[in-house]
Amino acid sequence: MSRKLVRPREGRMIAGVCAGLARRFNMSPFMVRLLFLLSLLLPGTQVIVYLVLWVLMPNEDRY
């Protein structure tokens, strides 16, 4: 199990951010995606945070 915060090549839906977070925190990727979608119902900067993580999280290939 990888403890680094990277975007995996397998299991991606869009950018791999949710799959990477799920792997890092030992959760189901489906659960992380569901939590993200539910968080969109609340006001806030969820999409911006997702985009920032997309840019900052390296691909799994680099490691």
Image: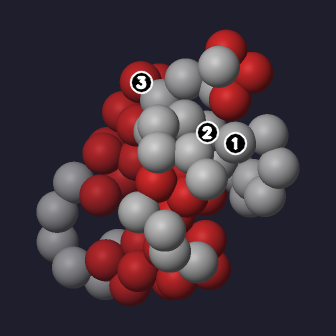
Residue 10 location (% of width, % of height): 82, 49
| Three-letter code, disc 1 | Pro
| Three-letter code, disc 2 | Arg
Q: Within 10 Å of the Cα at label 1, are there few (<14), some (14-19), or many (20+) other Cα atoms?
A: many
Q: Secondary structure at mark 3?
A: helix
- Residue 51 appears anywhere in the view: no
Question: According to the image, label 3 marks what residue?
Answer: 56
Q: Within 10 Å of the Cα at label 3, are there few (<14), some (14-19), or many (20+) other Cα atoms?
A: few
Question: According to the image, label 2 marks what residue?
Answer: 7
Q: Secondary structure at mark 1?
A: loop
* Callouts 1 and 3 close, C-beta under 8 Å: no
Say which label, 1 or 3, has the lower sequence index.
1
Q: Residue at left 61%, top 53%?
A: 1
Q: From this view, report whether residue 34 is shown above or below residue 54.
A: below
- Residue 47 appears anywhere in the view: yes
Q: Residue at left 58%, top 78%?
A: 28
Q: In this rendering, which labeled residue sits more in front, label 1 or label 3?
A: 1
* Callouts 2 and 3 close, C-beta under 8 Å: no
| Left or right, 23 with reference to 44 | right
Q: Residue at left 50%, top 74%?
A: 27
Q: Residue at left 61%, top 39%?
A: 7
Q: Which mark is residue 16?
A: none
Q: Within 10 Å of the Cα at label 2, are there few (<14), some (14-19), or many (20+) other Cα atoms?
A: many
Say which label, 2 or 3, has the lower sequence index.
2
Residue at the left extreme, as displayed: 44
Question: According to the image, label 1 marks what residue?
Answer: 8
Q: CA distance from mark 1 to mark 2?
A: 4 Å
Residue at the front extreme, as displayed: 1
| Left or right, 61 with reference to 1 | right
Which image quarter: residue 63? Answer: top right
Q: CA distance from mark 2 to mark 3?
A: 10 Å
